[in-house]
Image: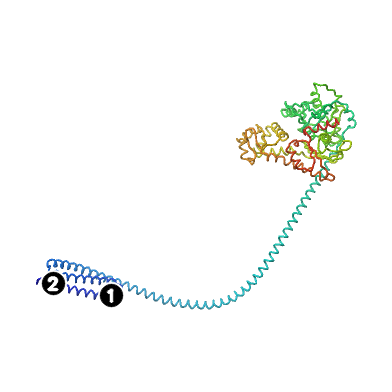
Amino acid sequence: MQTIRQEMTKQSALLQKEKSKIKELEDEKMNIRRSNRISYNEIQRLKQEVIINKSSASQHIQEKDEEIRKVSEEKEYLTKSLKAEQVKTAVLEEQKNEILRCSMTKDDKIEKLQKIIDETRSNMTKLKASNDAKLQNIRQKMSHNLVLLEREKVKLHELERGKTHMERMRRKTEEDLAKLREDHNDAKNNIKSLTDQHNEVIIKNREEIDRLKFQVEFMMKQQTMVPPVNMIRFSECKKSFKSLLMLVAIEIGTFFSGCCYSFEGLYKDSEKHGFVSPHLYTEEKLQKKIPTALLLNSKKEFECFGVDAEKRYSQAVESDNWFYFTKFKTMLFRSKDEKSEIQMKTLDGTKEMPAWFIYSLTIKYFKDVIKKSMERGTFREDDVGWIITLPPSATAESQQIMIQAAIKAGISERKLLVVSETDAIVALCRSEIVEPNIQCGVKVLILDLGSGSFDVCVCEVQEDQSLNIQLNASFPAVGWPQIKEAFEDIFIGIVGNRVFKQYCNEYPEEKKNWLEYIFRKICFESEVKKEYMYLELPIDLQNVLYKETGKEFAELICQSTFSDSLTCPANDKIKISLPVWHTLFDIPVHQIKYYVNQVTEMEGMKSLTNIIITGGIIQSETVQLRIKQLFLDKNIIIPKDVGFAVLRGAITIGMS
């Protein structure tokens, strides 16, 4: 027990030492707190730990008191607690040293912070002084700005007053502007009206100028052509023709010529129309008319006429030895000597012969054709009367040449009648059932769409059935030339100009036949209930195209501007839509309209209502319909079988 008490005393002494140490630590802690407030938290933590340790020590003492009864257990516990306290004391010593080191570091930091604070205070002082100066300046500026603000308020008040004034002025200006706009619109309307009137005047003046030009041109042509004379020997032949059994009419045109005949009994048979066309076989083709082409050999002897002449001349190796005449009317000329006879040049322009001689051979050719067609019957020349037609522009000299040619061809002058195509056409139209019928004293406008020229004639039917020619002129051909050019433009647009020219140069005969085929298609094929027109393609054109481009015709159509209106359903055919087909007729129809309007505007022609149209493309149903639609107020007369109308009219005159 004594030992325990000693041990307890020792423990108490140790505890007292610990307490003293704790007190010292607390004193040091207080000193540290006073020296460095920054480490206060650390000291507080240490103090708490010391308090905790003190509490723990008190607990240990109490436990020791309780364990006195249990000496061995409490001794062991106290030993362990002592060791733990010693460890904690060592830890506290280390913490103390750490706190001291931290205190020294904090002192350095506090010193630095103090310097920074001092510098900051110095800067703040300087900044305050600067801000005070700036504030003073700002106050001065504000005072100045207040003065300016007062001035601005005065100005603003003035501006408000000005704004009110400007608003009144703006409203007034808008009212003035609205009025000006109305005046401007009125002026524009007046200007437009004046412009329209000016344009109308210009158009009227242009139309008047065109009309005067046309009249001047018309008069000049009439003066240069010499008006046609009356039918030669009509009064003498009228009696002799009544006793004749047969009449023959011959028409020698610029491009095509033909003939027909009629018997007295046959003429009275209206169902047969009273006319017979001899079989003109050329290249084994039956035709009513044949090309006006005459071929003579080197001895100036007749070789052939028509298509045969064209073919033989084109195939001739040495054409210099031949005399080839074609397009008779255009090849006539006279030398400088006015008294010399009229000559006709060959196609190449290198040779010439008297015109009467060429016409004589042509008349003889048709005379032989009539004889040949009458081989099965009897043909006595004394029973035949001959009627030869001349174009409206023919002069008295032209008629004399034709009479001379007919006599040289073996026709008796007593059995010969020369009439103008105008007389023949009017006679035919008056003999046929036409509503209204052409009465005596009525003016008639005759348009002949010939292949070589466009003849315009105005005549008046006299009581004795003769015609009083009032206007007569010949102009460039209207109709087929323009349509042909339009067709060629379409094909050039597809295959190209170079390919088409090469085709024309290499295959002129096929091109000619192809154009004739197109002409027949235009004139004789109906468009009723059709959406497309079909044309055959020349095989040689396709060959040239493929040789030059390596492409087919159908492929080029798809690449052209005609892809929507043209197709190629087969290699040898082309399909053309009707709208495009109809555009081909626009130019000739408009030209016909122009000439009709110009003639009817001439003095004394406004009452003209009867118009006879013959020749060329007037055979086309499309052209006939469009012309009749253009002149609804006119009596448009188109003879039946237009291509044969002149010959039939000539027979009609002879039979009248």
> Marks 1 and 2, Cα distance to the nearest angstrom?
35 Å
> Looking at the rendering, which quadrant does residue 302 occupy?
top right
> Looking at the rendering, which quadrant does residue 223 occupy?
top right
Q: Secondary structure at mark 1?
A: helix
Q: Is residue 351 visible?
A: yes
Q: Which residue in the rendered view is the most extreme toward the left?
A: 2
Above or below, 404 against 606 in this view is above
User: Which tag, 1 or 2, sits closer to the chain's start?
Assistant: 2
In the rendered image, residue 636, in percent from the top left (x then y), is placed at 79, 39
The amino acid type found where label 2 is placed reads: Met
Label 2, residues with CA under 10 Å away: few <14, some 14-19, many ≥20: some
In front of the other: 42 or 72: 72
In the rendered image, residue 261, in percent from the top left (x then y), is placed at 81, 28
Above or below, 257 against 187 in this view is above
The amino acid type found where label 1 is placed reads: Arg
Residue that numbered label 2 is attached to: 8
> Looking at the rendering, which quadrant does residue 409 occupy?
top right
Marks 1 and 2 close (CB-CB < 8 Å): no
- In the drawing, what numbered circle is on residue 33? 1
